Image (cartoon, rainbow, N blue to C red):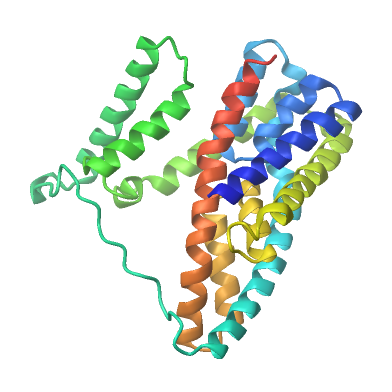
Amino acid sequence: MAIALLGVCGTILLCLTIGTLLFDWHTVLSAVPSLVGGLVAALLMSENLKAINLDSLAALPIYMLMFHGILGYPLTTILLKKEGNRLKKEFHQNLQAMTGAKEVAERTKVITKIPTNYRTSAFALARTGFVAVLAVLFGTVTNNVINANVVCLIFGIVFCQLGFLEKDILKSAGVFNWLIYGLTAYIFAQLSTTTPSSLLGFIPEILVLIVLSIFGMFLISRLVYKWFGYSKEMAMTMTLTALFGFPADYILTNDVIKEVAENEKEEAYLTAHMMPKMLVGGFATVSIASIIVASVFIKLF
């Protein structure tokens, strides 16, 4: 997690220094949250830019979201393959090495079991909605010192640890994909006021800032990877999760593991060493850091 968050810092550092020398300050501020995050950060920036009458920049966060994966996906795949081949050699050099993920003891929860009669999709959605309402009320009481999206994220984690919400509750309720489709459609609806010419006008900013973002991640990961005992490939890959997050981090890692591994033991070893790092990295960057960055950057306009 620390490496992924430091990678975010590398992106912000280069974009706010070199980027602001090349482009307008507001343009860079509009683009950076999408460079270190996903849908929520892009939507948050786009809506707030419209609210402060910067409609000309409102589409830029969505553009960044559309394009940064073009470089992120192939780079991640290449680095994951290098890491996978390295781990496969390591596995054969030490046959006594761990061949599967370590079992993690389940944390004690306050609410240990929900009665069977209440394990329904409707009740799951009702509990999720209740937590969301509490988060919004907390934001109102605190005058929204912390952005509502961040508060919802924190409340979701807390109530999940307490046992009030199950892990992947929206998936178990059968509405996760439907909500993602709706959110995606709503986000790209922000492009309704744009034109091909406006997109072409942002091409220099998009390309330069994406390159600066990736170079910032690369620079930080090369400086710190030895401190955390990781290979440079794994460190760089973890920082790149900022460009896509979940579920892309899971899909890419799983596909690479299946391609590199030649048997079940190798697959288990690679999964145990690669998958947790990628998932945690994606959660740290896209689910947490990008929303906080967007909340802070909004106040800088």
Relative to 6, is 277 above or below? Answer: below
Q: Residue 230: name its quadrant.
A: bottom right
Q: How many marks?
A: 0
Instruction: Return the x and y of residue 8 as percentages of the image width and height.
Output: 65, 41
Instruction: Return the x and y of residue 175 as percentages of the image width and height.
Output: 36, 45
Q: Can residue 185 be seen? A: no
| Residue 211 as seen in the image, left or right of residue 180 | right
Q: Which quadrant, please, contains the C terminus?
A: top right
Relative to 191, is 70 above or below? Answer: below
Residue that appears at 29% across and 42% down? 160
Front residue of this view, candidates 222 and 119: 222
| Residue 185 as seen in the image, left or right of residue 178 | right
Q: Residue 28: name its quadrant.
A: top right
Front residue of this view, candidates 48 and 106: 106
Instruction: Return the x and y of residue 44 as percentages of the image width and height.
Output: 58, 26
Relative to 81, is 216 above or below? Answer: above
Q: Residue 237: name its quadrant.
A: bottom right
Q: Can residue 140 be seen? A: yes
* Residue placed furthest toward the front: 227
Residue that appears at 76% across and 54% down? 71
Residue that appears at 65% across and 66% down? 231
Instruction: Return the x and y of residue 150 as percentages of the image width and height.
Output: 46, 29
Front residue of this view, candidates 205 and 163: 163
